[in-house]
Image: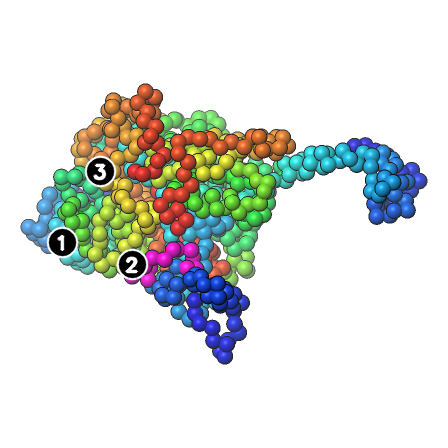
């Protein structure tokens, strides 16, 4: 959006509130004041562009929830620290509170006892939010699929956007999954949200909250 | 909920809210939310539905006196080292009692192992204590070799000891980082992970995996050492002592670190033995028990090393103990590299083994203490019973002894000094 | 403390075996040794007596409880609670196997001897359903309080257990024609 600024006063900031100079300031952007008040012109197309810009901003500063379940959490921490440095993608601030987080990286085996608290965390996160299933345990139950106390895939209890296979995935794998998530975020993730139906859905096990 | 007494103290806004809520509910003809039975009062605060306490201990923790309240930490909490839940009973800012609630990562590994063949058991035990994966495989491998009646080749034993000691250095290094992190120092964990990544690169060069190696076999190890591993080991050995010294300089004499660890969470030797605390935590309390010396397994009877102990038994001693053990491990690695013989790394063992009926017990010294496996064979291809004793699970019992009388913020620091890993705690 | 040698032959356990037969005499059953372990079986009702003697006798001095585990020997047999003990004076692990009746699985707690037995006993109660009388905190430790079965017992079968499959020994996940999808994920097991 390379538009020349007004030549008359190049250093003056554009203040829409300055009604007297509005035409002069806005004409380089192809806008003019509407006779019935307000502005029209290129401004009308800005809402779609604002969404695009917002998606771009969202995609490049996703804040994950600081939540690790088991082994994959160590590789997630390794991804966050200096050697692999996920900060390059604007993702360093791992938030401890779900209210401040955008992404839930489910890192590790989800057990029936933990399913309730995890769903509650997911529900506490504000929209828009995304979920990354890290490791084979969270995608399908992995090596613990036969166990009596393991949820066979986190997509049984919450929608998942990106699956990262591996046991545990290498940090590079998680970074690749995060770049896929960036694409997803930029493409309006609504259509992409998966909720795999594999058998009867269950969100509550015996005494799952406690 | 305790009764409000305006004469003795300033009313608590939460209590005022509760009283107002009770008044509104009564006006609307609804039943009061909170039950009036005293032993249920604590249950209400941490979200347990009304039920009578199941045990004496539960009644003790969840019944509240005047001025006490319960705080729920976890299972999602940034510094509980995984998915552990602590119910902390506090009076103001002082901890009165603590009740660890476990099982949020219980994956039923023992049951899965009893349904797997002896060779595949070694893959199931990997995620137990996920900072000491090589140790997790070591004890079952020894137990199955006892059952099957074979001995691994000498070179395999040396490679085992080598990777196990490397893992110990990595695990203790991370513990130092986490301990500082739980007191608010972010920098040491970054350095700790740089050191860990070097060791992980070595391990992935020799085993092909970064964390869950599946490197041990019944009767040997999977691969011999290779050039990449040896060159990485040489580079690492060149600067590891300098790195440790730098970490030490960053933490050991830090005034805040000392203030929050010295005389915190003091555990006496007798208490530690009674509570089943083992490993560096026990040696920090002055008891020189190390399975590598007490019941030498593998090739540890051929190597020279000291069992170091500390006297004070507080968090600071547990931290110093880790540093001393890292240095001992590096000393051991030097000896292993000097003495390593040539030869095969794997005995001739079929893919599915059927040991004769019998029992075997194998204990090793993991970075968190005595890790043991008790395996029973009935002559079939699967273990009839496969039992693992994880040191951090047992060490957690020390928490109700260590925490009372401390500030809430110190519970995390004391817990980090015990260095539990939830994968091992919950199996 | 000097370097200790691994017990390579049962002969090295001779002094311990002699001491044990002196102290307990005919109470010991199935006294045996293997590579580095000495083991014997006792009656479940006598566990406190035997373990107290093992801990407090100055010649035996088994001061440390290394492990406490439970074994299920099948529906028509018994449970066993297995204690592994350590002493500086003897170069062997001592394994004490205490028999517990399967129809009434009760045994005395040892938390007054070693406080650290508490979590072991809670785990055994959770996984095997053995009741330790006198334990102050016998709740489920891994599964949630309203869980109703004991997963480590032999009669608790995993949903796709190889032993349970039509072709014994082959995991039915590898044979799609045997998949019984109604048994997957309903959680009623």
Query: Nearer the observer, disc 2 or disc 1?
Result: 2
Mark 2 burial class by Cα count in 10 Å: few <14, some 14-19, many 20+: few
Badges 2 and 1, same chain: no
Note whether residue A142 is visible: no
Q: Quadrant of the N terminus of chain B?
A: bottom left
The reply to whether dot 3 and dot 1 touch (C-beta < 8 Å) is no
Q: Nearer the viewer, residue A101 or B95?
A: A101
Q: Quadrant of the C terminus of chain B?
A: top left
Query: Nearer the observer, disc 3 or disc 1?
Result: 3
Q: Which mark is residue A173?
A: none
x 33%, y 30%: residue: C182
Q: Nearer the viewer, residue B410 or B180?
A: B410
Q: Which mark is residue B55?
A: 2
Q: Position of residue B28 (x, y in %)?
A: 48, 63
- State how far apart marks 3 and 2 are (Cα): 27 Å
Q: Quadrant of residue C189?
A: top left
Q: Which residues are magenta?
A: B44-59
x 49%, y 32%: residue: A195
Q: In the structure shown, which secondary structural element does the residue marked by tag 3 occupy?
A: loop
- State how far apart marks 2 and 1 are (Cα): 23 Å
Residue wearing tag 1? C45
């Amino acid at each position: 959006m390379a538009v020349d600024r007004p030549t008359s006063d190049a250093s003056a900031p554009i203040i829409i509130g300055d009604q007297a100079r509005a035409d002069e300031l806005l004409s380089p952007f192809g806008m003019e004041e509407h006779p019935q008040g307000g502005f029209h012109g290129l401004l009308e197309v800005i809402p779609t562009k604002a969404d695009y810009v917002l998606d771009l901003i969202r995609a490049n500063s996703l804040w994950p929830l600081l939540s690790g379940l088991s082994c994959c959490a160590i590789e997630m921490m390794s991804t966050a620290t200096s050697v692999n440095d996920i900060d390059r993608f604007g993702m360093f601030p791992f938030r401890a509170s779900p209210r401040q987080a955008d992404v839930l990286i489910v890192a590790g085996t989800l057990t029936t006892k933990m399913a309730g608290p995890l769903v509650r965390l997911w529900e506490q996160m504000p929209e828009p939010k995304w979920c990354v299933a890290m490791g084979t345990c969270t995608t399908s139950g992995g090596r613990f699929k036969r166990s009596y106390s393991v949820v066979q895939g986190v997509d049984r209890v919450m929608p998942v956007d990106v699956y990262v296979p591996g046991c545990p995935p290498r940090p590079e794998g998680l970074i690749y999954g995060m770049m896929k998530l960036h694409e997803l975020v930029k493409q309006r993730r609504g259509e992409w949200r998966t909720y795999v139906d594999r058998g009867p859905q269950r969100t509550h096990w015996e005494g799952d909250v406690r | 909920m305790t009764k409000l007494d305006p004469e003795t103290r300033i009313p608590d806004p939460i209590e005022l809210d509760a009283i107002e809520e009770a008044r509104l509910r009564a006006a609307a003809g609804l039943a009061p939310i909170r039950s009036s039975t005293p032993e249920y009062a604590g249950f209400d605060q941490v979200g347990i539905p009304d039920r009578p306490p199941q045990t004496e201990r539960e009644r003790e923790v969840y019944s509240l006196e005047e001025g006490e309240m319960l705080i729920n930490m976890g299972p999602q909490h940034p510094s509980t080292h995984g998915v552990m839940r602590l119910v902390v009973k506090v009076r103001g800012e002082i901890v009165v009692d603590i009740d660890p609630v476990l099982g949020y990562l219980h994956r039923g590994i023992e049951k899965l192992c009893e349904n797997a063949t002896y060779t595949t058991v070694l893959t199931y035990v990997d995620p137990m204590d996920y900072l000491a994966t090589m140790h997790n495989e070591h004890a079952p491998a020894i137990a199955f070799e006892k059952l099957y009646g074979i001995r691994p080749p000498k070179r395999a034993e040396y490679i085992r000891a080598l990777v196990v000691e490397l893992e110990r250095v990595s695990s203790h290094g991370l513990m130092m980082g986490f301990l500082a992190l739980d007191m608010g120092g972010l920098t040491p964990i970054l350095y700790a992970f740089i050191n860990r990544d070097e060791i992980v690169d070595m391990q992935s060069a020799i085993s092909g995996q970064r964390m869950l190696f599946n490197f041990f076999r019944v009767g040997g190890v999977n691969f011999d050492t290779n050039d990449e591993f040896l060159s990485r080991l040489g580079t690492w050995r060149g600067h590891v002592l300098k790195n440790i010294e730098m970490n030490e300089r960053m933490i050991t004499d830090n005034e805040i670190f000392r203030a929050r660890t010295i005389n915190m969470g003091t555990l006496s030797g007798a208490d530690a033995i009674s509570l089943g605390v083992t490993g560096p935590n026990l040696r920090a309390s002055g008891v020189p028990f190390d399975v590598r010396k007490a019941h030498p397994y593998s090739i540890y009877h051929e190597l020279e090393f000291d069992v170091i102990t500390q006297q004070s038994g507080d968090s600071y001693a547990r931290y110093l103990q880790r540093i001393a053990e890292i240095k001992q491990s590096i000393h051991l690695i030097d000896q292993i590299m000097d003495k390593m013989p040539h030869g095969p790394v794997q005995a001739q063992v079929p893919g599915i083994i059927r040991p004769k009926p019998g029992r075997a017990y194998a204990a090793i010294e993991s970075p968190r203490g005595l890790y043991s496996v008790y395996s029973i064979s009935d002559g079939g291809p699967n273990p009839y019973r496969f039992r693992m004793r994880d040191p951090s699970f047992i060490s957690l019992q020390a928490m109700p002894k260590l925490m009372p009388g401390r500030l809430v913020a110190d519970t995390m620091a004391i817990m980090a000094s015990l260095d539990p890993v939830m994968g091992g705690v919950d199996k | 403390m000097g370097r200790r040698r691994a017990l390579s032959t049962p002969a090295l356990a001779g002094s311990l075996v002699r001491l044990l037969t002196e102290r307990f005499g005919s109470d010991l059953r199935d006294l045996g040794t293997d590579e580095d372990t000495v083991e014997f079986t006792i009656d479940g009702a006598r566990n406190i007596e035997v373990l107290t003697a093992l801990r407090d006798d100055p010649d035996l001095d088994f001061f440390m409880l290394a492990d406490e585990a439970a074994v299920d020997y099948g529906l028509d047999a018994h449970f066993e609670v297995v204690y592994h003990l350590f002493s500086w004076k003897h170069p062997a692990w001592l394994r004490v196997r205490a028999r517990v009746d399967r129809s009434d699985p009760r045994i005395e707690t040892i938390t007054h001897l070693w406080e650290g037995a508490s979590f072991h006993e809670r785990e055994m109660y959770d996984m095997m359903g053995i009741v330790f009388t006198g334990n102050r905190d016998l709740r489920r430790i891994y599964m949630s309080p309203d869980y109703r079965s004991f997963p480590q017992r032999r009669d608790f079968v995993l949903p796709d257990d190889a032993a349970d499959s039509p072709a014994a020994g082959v995991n039915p996940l590898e044979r799609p024609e045997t998949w019984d999808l109604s048994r997957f994920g309903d959680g009623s097991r």
